[in-house]
Image (tube, rainbow, N blue to C red):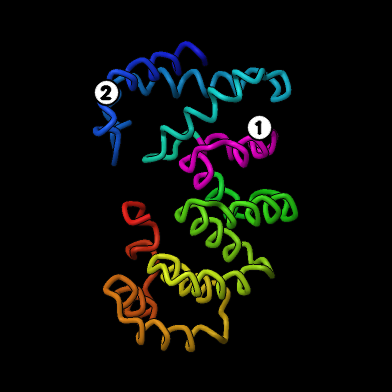
Amino acid sequence: MSTAVNAFRRWASERPVDERSGEWECDYAKWPEINAAFLTHIKTGPPHASTAGDIADLLYAIGRDNETAYLVRELAGREDWFLFLLPHALAVNDPDVKWQFAVQLGVGAFPFVAAESALLKLVQDEHEYVRRMALQGLGRMASPHAEPLCVRAWESNHEYQRIMVLWVLKELKSRNLHEYILLAKADGRQFLMRNVAEIENGMAPSDSQVDQRQHT
């Protein structure tokens, strides 16, 4: 694993910092090597045999794979590995790791208590997009904390937090959704209004602004 990750690190170090934005990681030509090394590691050994270096490499690879999220989905298919890496993902200073774990936690394939506990930490994160995806995860798993946290997210006045609030309330079939739709209309910002229209028209959130990261 370390050989493949170190090769990426060398490639990245040669790329100007001002070019490391958007989908820059996708330009790397040797992703098949990283993917193969990652899968070999999680399929051929027990999680607790991993060294601190192994853990750092696995999380680094997941973070750089943030456009396809292939590695984290593969990890999520192995509960022992996912739950082993989860506390390390919560502690790492990499929002592209954290939000991907948040998304997987919200799918509902992990023990409720462990998933909810992790998401309640992530929803406090300093990065807006991590908080947003954690709130979505709590809504998807119908956590009793989801709706109260929607109030706080709305009060942030961040447009994309407010967008997520609407979708979470819709997911929860909350009786307060109508009230927040009225508040959204009073707010009037472009992307918020687009999502209001999608909700009122019964559309799914896949085409909404809910997952946009460029505005975080």
Taking 98 as reference, is 86 left or right?
right
- The residue lying at 62 percent from left, 38 percent from top is 91
Say which label, 2 or 1, has the lower sequence index.
2
Label 1 neighbour load within 10 Å: few <14, some 14-19, many 20+: some
Instruction: Give the dominant element type of the magenta stretch: helix, strand or loop.
Output: helix
Q: CA distance from mark 2 to mark 1?
A: 32 Å
Query: What residue sits right under mark 1 in the picture?
Result: 81
Q: Quadrant of the C terminus?
A: bottom left
In x, y percent, where is residue 120?
65, 57
Q: Nearer the viewer, residue 9 or 137?
A: 9
Q: Residue at x 57, y 25 (%)?
A: 56
Give the vertical position of 75 relative to 210 (above or below).
above
Task: Please say whether residue 156 is visible from this viewpoint.
Answer: yes
Q: Residue furthest top?
A: 3
Residue range corresponding to the magenta coloring: 72-100
Q: In terms of secondary structure, where does tag 2 sit?
A: loop
Task: Check if residue 183 falls in the magenta segment.
Answer: no
* Callout 1 secondary element: helix
Say which residue appears at 57% left-offset and 81% top-offset: 174
Type of residue at label 1? Trp
For disc 2, the marked residue is: 15
